[in-house]
Image (cartoon, grey):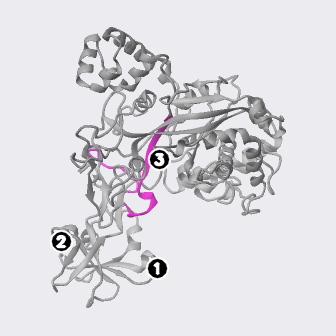
Amino acid sequence: MSDESIRMSQVIGIFGPGAMLDLPERSVVVGGLDRWEMRGPNAFRKIEEPRLSSLLHARLVNDPRLGVDRPPDLRTPPIDPNDRRLAKPFVEASVFPEWFVCDVVDGDQPGCRRLVRFSDLKPPARKEHVAEDGKKRRASPIRFVCGCTKGHLQDIEWRRILHGDGGPCREQMWLVDGGTSADPRDTRVVCDCSQSLTLEELFQPKRLGPCRGERPWIGDRDPVPCNAPKGLSLLTRSATNTYFPQVATVISLPQAEDDLSRRIEQHWSILRKAPNAAWIVIARDANPAVGASLVGYSDEQVFARVQHLASVTKGSDTAVDPRLAEFDLLSSGRRLIGENSPSALLHAGTLDRSVWDPNRDAVLSGIASLVAVHRLREVVCLYGFTRFEPAALANDDLEDVGLAVDGAPLARSPTWLPAVEQFGEGIFIVLDPDALGAWLARPAFAVRARTMADGVGRWVKARRDRGLRADASDLGERIRPEYIMAHSLAHALMTEVALDCGYPASALKERIYVPGLKPDDAIRAGILIYTASAGMQGTLGGLVEVTRRFTQVLHGALERLRLCSGDPVCADHDPASADEDRALHGAACHGCLLVAETSCEARNLHMDRALLVDTVGPVGAGFFA
């Protein structure tokens, strides 16, 4: 990998359009989709996932993050052809910020570094600044920029802020470090005209001025005037709060019933546009891959099947939340789920209880069934991003699937969205509805549930005190005790599975299924623990083999939770008196339940081991107690 290359999965994550990226000689902002060079043969691949495309279309109606009134195409980021004879597709990135600080050389005052613009650096490399004294000074990007909660980003206007009167001063400006700490009070910006300020002053409300709606990843200004409540705020360029990607993820489910349907689904984004059978002829000729896939079937047969699949897609299939569809299929109890073939998107099977619970262990009485997922495909799509704070989640009559209700777009008017597909394996655990009902009826559980609810109230109040929008409904089903318990169990199992099967803990992921309740509905919950990658790491079979040792793995996971290295502080944690996100935790810390952020679907929030087992603090509320 070259110094200026990143993985496709990183482009869909922390280094997507609008993110700042440090290169060896520069800091850049990753360009928007309009600035991705993807021409040429095999420069990218389309990813066929109708359920995800339909979901994005339904949830992003009249939203600038989607610029077409149809399900968006899903495309991979540019693919390196590994052929020197062909031009490489690429993602354009612009130099950002354009303010640089120079190294101190002999003769400079200690701790004083020149502030210069990118245009002031010596061409063509623009890595050095030659001052009036003739000395060369290497320059590096300044650490500080500014942005707003709407995702806008811009350079700090140092001259305007330093010279509040807006005068035409063009004297040299300096960044002066007054100490060895990173305290903003110890760093000052000074002009030779005697004006100065400390970085601490930049934290004052409105000190950085109004937000102009700058979008350097797109190369324009937002046509909609920015109404961010706090205006511009100071950002440290490499801080984690500069970019929160908004991604939607689904596990692909088998849709096709026969060979023709499967072939059509492979090229669905093209064939779904067919108005008649004659159009199929054109599609075969214009796209050799489509023609090769449809060999042996007449145009009339293909068009008739396209119409059938389109009617299914417009019907009940897309009305079902993807997670509900996944849960219903994986918890169906079928011996074979999907198809056992190398090209299958999903191959799983419900195991006989004698395989994973041969002795009818009492601890496993709360587990209804166990599914070995031999092969799965995960499709991850990036559709926007936020800065400073992760966006609240969308909520409607369906279960929340992680689509955020606010965020910055990836292009001026996106007609397609970047996505990646990854293959892997996993285990799916269905919790017993009767056991869940009995657990929810316990008096000790009711006491613990009130404690967790008080924490949610504390979180809402703390955010509102900071001037942020907050409501318990923003958290969706994640505040339900069933979710908190299932989420805690998933983290405990991921840690234990990593020790048992050899996968690195950071390679494991979770999906928690807690379907919404309707009158007379039984309480249902499920957990998918899986691993998926573009390479072979997700297909080694280690997770599936864990099913044969599930009794030992579950016992080990629960035993580790009874006593934490952080006890009694961890066990006695009171959500109602905690600050910010810690109010959404019960007994959970890095010593017991927290895992890598990339493994958790809920940012390591909404967990409590007291809802699983008895601890040195609360007792009697655990599902397995």
Q: Name the residue under label 2.
A: 120
**Other residues around mark 2 within 10 Å, as few (<14) / some (14–19) / many (≥20):** some
Mark 2: which secondary structure? helix
Image quadrant in which you'd find residue 437: top right
Q: Name the residue under label 1.
A: 181
Spot the residue most to the bottom.
Answer: 107
Question: Of the residues shown, which amino acid type is indicated by label 2?
Answer: Asp
**Other residues around mark 3 within 10 Å, as few (<14) / some (14–19) / many (≥20):** many
Question: Of the residues shown, which amino acid type is indicated by label 1?
Answer: Ser
Measured in 3D between alpha carbons, the distance from the residue under mark 3 to the one under mark 1, in whole angstroms, is 32 Å
Measured in 3D between alpha carbons, the distance from the residue under mark 3 to the one under mark 2, in whole angstroms, is 38 Å
Mark 1: which secondary structure? loop
Q: In which quarter of the image is the C terminus?
A: top right
Could you say where residue 351 lies in the image, as x and y percent from the top left?
70, 30
Image quadrant in which you'd find residue 544: top right
> Compared to 24, does 1 lie above or below?
above
Magenta-span inclusion, residue 387: no
- Residue in the foreground of this view, choosing between 62 and 239: 239
Q: Mark 3 points at which residue?
A: 391
**Other residues around mark 1 within 10 Å, as few (<14) / some (14–19) / many (≥20):** few
Question: Of the residues shown, which amino acid type is indicated by label 3?
Answer: Ala
- Residue in the foreground of this view, choosing between 469 and 554: 554
